[in-house]
Image: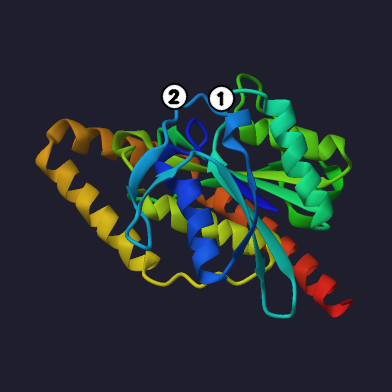
Amino acid sequence: MLAAFEGWNDAGSAASLALEHLADVWGAEQVDELDPEEYHDFQVNRPTVGPGPDGERRLTWPTTKVSVATLPGGRQVVLVHGIEPSMRWRRYCAELLDIATNLHVGSVVTVGALLADVPHTRPIPVSATTDDPDLRDALGLEANTYEGPTGIVGVLQHEARAQGRRALSLWAAVPHYVAHPPSPKATLAILHKIEQVIGATVPLGELVEDAIAWQHGVDELAGEDSEIGDYVRQLEEAKDTAELPEASGEAIAQEFERYLRRRDRGTNG
């Protein structure tokens, strides 16, 4: 199960747009939907009105949709996409995990994005963390050491783990000075990380071109505003200093170890 939620957990809409992209390219079919009356304050997340496919005006409520995609080879991936609920988070997570049980889900991957001091000119960092030591060893993930306020992705991951499911979390770091959505470069980075974690190919379509165009647009902004340009250069220097050759060599070694583990698992079926 891959889950992303609009709102606090979704800087630049990078995570929710990644789930929308997966649903589109994998041809996912909706199988369930949570009742928004139970979980949303409609003065915070209001319904919208507009024409439907048949031309009739209709209301669209801020709900959570559950879809299933069948990948080549018959493997199924459950996609959860919604808006962070306003209330009853424990009941909300319990309902999603009941659906996961009915769909025979063994692993839950929550996907989020946060604003960070990172330059748009460098690869978007995506962290993958888990409290599961077996997953850390198998996939080369980091331990989850975050302390502080959490969103619905943190609660869902915790509840999934409490039920004995494998659970991990992906977070993309979106440059805070270009926080307005969309953020296609961050969405692309999330999709690359999802490919690595679940071992499935994701067709990217026009997303690569969108990411390049987005970066060019931010380059122009930085070129026209000297303060932003100077700030970006400071971020670049800090990023490059943190990735000295010895650090890069360690990262290469870790990636090679992950490759060997994936190859061994493939050889053994």
According to the picture, the residue beneath numbered tag 2 turns out to be: 44
Residue 239 in picture, x, y percent from top left: 42, 41
Indicate which disc residue 161 carries: none
Label 2 sits on what residue type? Val
Residue 109 in picture, x, y percent from top left: 68, 49
Q: Is residue 83 left or right of residue 88?
A: left
Question: In the picture shown, does residue 122 fall above or below 150?
Answer: below
Image quadrant where residue 49 sits: top left
User: Is there any visible trace of residue 120 in the rendered image?
Assistant: no
| Residue shown at the point (66%, 21%) measured from the top left | 147
Image quadrant where residue 259 sits: bottom right
Q: Is residue 1 left or right of residue 52?
A: right
Marks 2/1: CA distance? 8 Å
Instruction: Point out the residue furthest to the front here.
Output: 56
Label 1 sits on what residue type? Ser
Query: Front-most of 73 and 30?
Result: 30
Give the class, few, some or many, for how many residues have Cα within 10 Å of label 2's Cα (few <14, many ≥20): few
Residue 111 in picture, x, y percent from top left: 59, 45
User: Is there any visible trace of residue 12 in the rendered image?
Assistant: yes
| Residue shown at the point (84%, 46%) measured from the top left | 165
Dot placed on the residue nearer the N-terminal end, 2 or 1: 2
Circles 2 and 1: CB atoms closer than 8 Å? yes
Question: In the picture shown, does residue 238 fall above or below 80?
Answer: above
Q: Is residue 48 left or right of residue 242?
A: left
According to the picture, the residue beneath numbered tag 1 turns out to be: 86
Residue 138 in picture, x, y percent from top left: 81, 56
